[in-house]
Amino acid sequence: MPIDVRTLCLACTLSVFSLAASMTYVWRQRRTYPGFGAWVGSAWCSVAGLILLLLRGTTSDALSVHGTNALLYAAAGLVVAGLYTFSGLRAPLRGLLALGLGVLALNAGFLHLHPSLQARVAIHSFLTGGLCLWAAGLTWTRLPRVLVRPNGLLSYTLLALGLLYSARGLASLFIPPASQHFMAPNPLQQVALLAYLLGQAALFTGLLVLNGQRVEEDLEHSLEDYQKLRGLIPICASCKKIRDDQGVWDPLETYLHQHAGVAFTHGLCPDCATVFREEGLRRGSAAPG
């Protein structure tokens, strides 16, 4: 017996809820980086959007359709914004917002002016697919700024989701639904929801792995710096500058700041203060007149 669409929506909602709870726990209890909060927001937007989708047919279409589209678009957009921030770049929030408002206005036209489930599904699929492909590109072009090793799970999950959503959009254009009701039995809809369920699990797992990967690499760098400070350090016997691995002589303060994160404040010890005071008095007494 095939699983109906509403049951699949419920399964997706419960699964994404567990993922959102896990993301929130890591965000609050573990070390995370800028951008992770956007991914937590993405997970909860997905949960809220799926709840409104689950209520389709039991509440007003305007609330269910517009709310679901806005929240699921926000979920995809926050993944993109989070990847920019995680990579140390400024997220194009204005562009994402303008794109979202334009698509929501287009969806409203196909709900109120010319009702068409086929058009709305195609628009949502192409938009989400485009955002997933955008995010996949960021994992290959921007993440190397902060990570040495690539994250294949996240990159290929986003690529697969982008291609699947785009294929769904094309299929929606050429295979009209048998009913204008979203919850009506529809094999294409069922396959899309199953793909969404698996894709969300892989996506948020990949984001968790990405954050853990950066924590691990930062720890490795800290250990490397620690080992450098433990070994023999070539230092000038006269000026006290230190030679680094590239043969550059840096002041002691600069070297320790780069390798140990030490910050310095400069002052005079009592002995040096006495010496400077005596030198000043001698120079003053030796001045002519």
Image: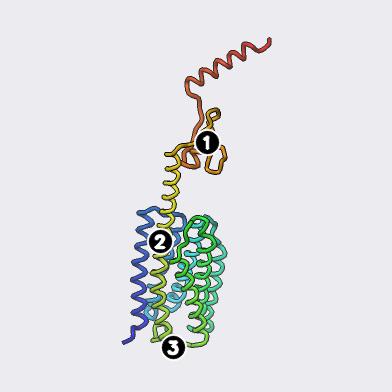
Instruction: Check the image and name the residue furthest to the top.
Output: 289
Residue 144 versus residue 277 in the image, above or below: below
Q: CA distance from mark 2 to mark 3?
A: 41 Å
Give the residue type that dot 2 points to: Val
Q: Tell me where residue 242 appears, x and y as whole percent.
A: 52, 36
Q: CA distance from mark 2 to mark 1?
A: 38 Å
For label 3, the residue is 179
Circle 3 Cα neighbour tier, 10 Å, few/some/many (<14 / 14–19 / ≥20): few
Dot 3 or dot 1, earlier in sequence: 3
User: Along the line of sight, which residue is nearer the eye, 28 or 143?
Assistant: 143
Circle 2 Cα neighbour tier, 10 Å, few/some/many (<14 / 14–19 / ≥20): some
Q: Are marks 2 and 1 in contact (CB under 8 Å)?
A: no
Q: Tell me where residue 285 appears, x and y as whole percent.
A: 62, 11
Give the residue type that dot 1 points to: Ile
Q: Tell me where residue 119 appears, x and y as whole percent.
A: 51, 82
For label 2, the residue is 209
Give the residue type that dot 3 points to: Ser
Residue 133 versus residue 233 in the image, above or below: below
Residue occupying image coordinates x 62% and y 15%:
283
Q: Is residue 11 left or right of residue 256?
A: left
Dot 2 or dot 1, earlier in sequence: 2
